[in-house]
Amino acid sequence: MTSDYQSYRAVVENAKDLPKLSGVIKQLLDMIKNPTNSAADVGQLISQDVALASLTLKLVNSPFYGFSQEVHSITHAIVIMGFSRVKNLALAGSVLRSFKPTQTEGFDYYGFWEHSMATAITAETLAQAIDSDYSDEAFISGLLHDQGKLIFVRYFPDEFAKVLKLIDRQQITMREAEQQVLGFDHSHIGGWLAEKWSFPEHLCLGIRMHHAPLLARQHRQLIWIVHTADILSRALCIGAGGDPFIHELPEYVWKQLRLTPELVRNVFESVLSGMARAGDFLELIRNG
């Protein structure tokens, strides 16, 4: 990685207001690895952070999941949704509480989370459609794939403004503009932050490599899924992906994931249906 990246990363690493996750998250990630822990054990841990538990339950009870009866406890949520999904919702809740809404000129905070949510739903739907082993992890990977952009907006607003001007002036992608201005792009700093937060390896790589799946050596299918979900969600023109360009799926993506036109059409329909139910969920993840 370039010296530019190292110097910019040092600024973030030394920042006194660097976002921190809930103290229970690392314990939660460790606890999930132990198969002897029960739903009650995990529920009790998450409930130690009252605000996080409350937000997680609000997400669980949003129309997005469509439960007919209200889920009143984290333990109950785990029983009906599974460890992985509740863990990922708690992780998402902790991350999203760490980033406050920003008013940076040119950055559409609402649109950012719309795009992130669309990518999350697309990734999960796609993973299920191809019967991927990463079906439980695809949603959170898609939701957080662009978290590096929030770091740029928060700590480097002047450089970010230059990126936006470059996109408009040269009609290039956000990633290309970031590389010209900063020497690296949002996926690198987003992946670094995921590592600093001790995210699982597959999630770190899903964030860091989502623009470079051909270079992936581990957790390749998840990275391909997030990469593809990003492209497909842009094709649906949902939210703000950072630049106005819609990209065709490269041939190698079709081959790698064994996609068919019918499968992609079905994914599109599922995503549009999911987004129609996601209004309250979006409001919660934007505002906590």
Image (tube, rainbow, N blue to C red):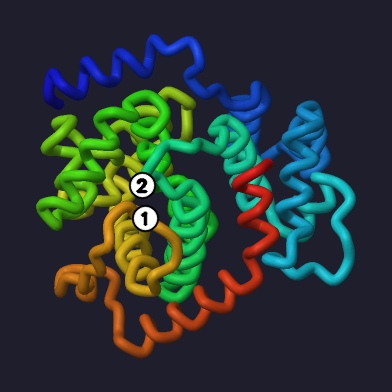
In primary-sequence order, the first of circles 2 and 1 is 2
In this rendering, the answer to whether 254 lies above or below 226 is below
Residue 222, numbered label: 1
Image quadrant holding the C terminus, namely: top right
Quarter of the view holding residue 241 = bottom left
**Residue 169 position in % (x across, y down):** 13, 51
Mark 1 neighbour class, 10 Å CA radius: few under 14, some 14 to 19, many 20 or more: many
Q: Amino acid at mark 1?
A: Leu
SS class of the residue under badge 2?
helix
Q: Which residue is mark 2?
A: 206
Identify the residue shown where x is 78% and y is 44%. Answer: 39
**Residue 137 visible (yes or no):** no
Q: Which mark is residue 32?
A: none
Question: Looking at the image, which is closer to me, 84 or 139?
Answer: 139
Q: Residue at x 52, y 24 (%)?
A: 19
Q: Quadrant of residue 149?
A: top left
Q: Is residue 96 left or right of residue 150?
A: right
Please state if 170 lies on the left or on the right of 49 as rendered.
left
The residue sitting at 49% across, 70% down in the picture is 125
